[in-house]
């Protein structure tokens, strides 16, 4: 299968290993991965902070860039959620019916990574090997917008050598929420403290998730507290093999 890859801003600028792992994983499974160089931001941060009109050029670019492809993968529940639930809405609100229709069409072909693997490629065992004790944080957007459910957990359970431990109060937000962490720092810090306590209680070596934004927030706290627990994107675990 030919799959177009939307890397996302955070992966591109701060967490390139998550993007590279996504490509390695899909190529190992026998698929061709295409990276359209015209891609930029999905516009989520503009939309969520009230700058919807300013997001329109980004929405147009996403629709134009990815319209030629039948399948698009995004290693982020947050960005996938924005593409699927916000792009057409914003276009409609600003009177661009053509863009709304095009955005709806492209959004229907856009999948978060675990969705792509299980729902489209119909694979749960991706041949991964990762001999570590791991806990999984289900991010808010993956739970409530893309609704990936237990798909990441199903993939992790098939990774050889991996010991998966349940995260207490897993569905509680980590406190990041984009600019929420900046505008409501005290509340965000309190939410992060609860999340870190739950992660530490598992005795895990690694905390994983499908969004680098949440991992950045949680990982920063775990590092500052010298817990010794690492954060790593789901794609990096699934791309790992005994050879690597």
Image: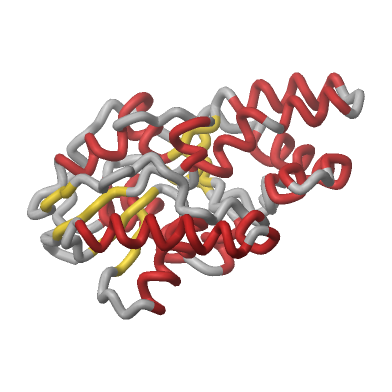
Q: Is residue 19 visible?
A: no
Quarter of the image holding residue 70?
A: top right
Q: Position of residue 199 (x, y in %)?
A: 28, 58
Q: Position of residue 167 (x, y in %)?
A: 26, 48
Q: Is residue 20 above or below residue 80?
A: below
Quarter of the image holding residue 243?
A: bottom left
Residue placed most toward the observer, 208 or 174:
174
Farthest right residue in view: 95
- Residue sitting at x 25%, y 31%: 123
Residue placed most toward the observer, 193 or 131:
193
Quadrant for the C terminus, please: bottom left
Quadrant for the N terminus, please: top left
Q: Is residue 183 left or right of residue 126?
A: right
Q: Is residue 33 above or below residue 124?
A: below
Q: Number of labelled discs?
A: 0
Q: Position of residue 197 (x, y in %)?
A: 31, 61
Instruction: Indicate the colouring scheme.
Output: secondary structure
């Amino acid at each position: 299968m030919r799959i177009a890859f939307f890397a996302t801003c955070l992966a591109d600028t701060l967490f390139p290993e998550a993007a590279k792992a996504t490509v390695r994983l899909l190529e190992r499974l026998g698929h061709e991965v295409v990276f359209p160089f015209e891609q930029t931001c999905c516009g989520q941060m503009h939309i969520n902070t009230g700058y919807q009109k300013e997001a329109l050029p980004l929405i147009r670019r996403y629709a134009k860039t990815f319209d030629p492809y039948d399948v698009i993968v995004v290693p982020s529940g947050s960005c996938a959620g924005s593409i699927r639930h916000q792009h057409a809405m914003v276009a409609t609100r600003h009177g661009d019916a053509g863009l709304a229709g095009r955005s709806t069409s492209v959004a229907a072909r856009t999948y978060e990574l675990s969705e792509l693997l299980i729902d489209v490629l119909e694979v749960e065992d991706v041949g991964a090997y990762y001999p570590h004790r791991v806990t999984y944080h289900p991010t808010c957007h993956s739970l409530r917008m893309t609704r990936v459910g237990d798909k990441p957990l199903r993939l992790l359970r098939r990774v050889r050598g991996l010991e998966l431990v349940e995260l207490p109060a897993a569905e509680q937000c980590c406190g990041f929420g984009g600019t929420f962490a900046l505008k409501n720092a005290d509340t965000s810090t309190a939410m992060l403290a609860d999340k870190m306590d739950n992660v530490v209680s598992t005795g895990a070596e690694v905390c994983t998730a499908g969004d680098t934004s949440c991992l950045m927030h949680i990982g920063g706290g775990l590092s500052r507290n010298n817990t010794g627990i690492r954060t790593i994107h789901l794609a990096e675990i699934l791309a790992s093999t005994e050879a690597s």
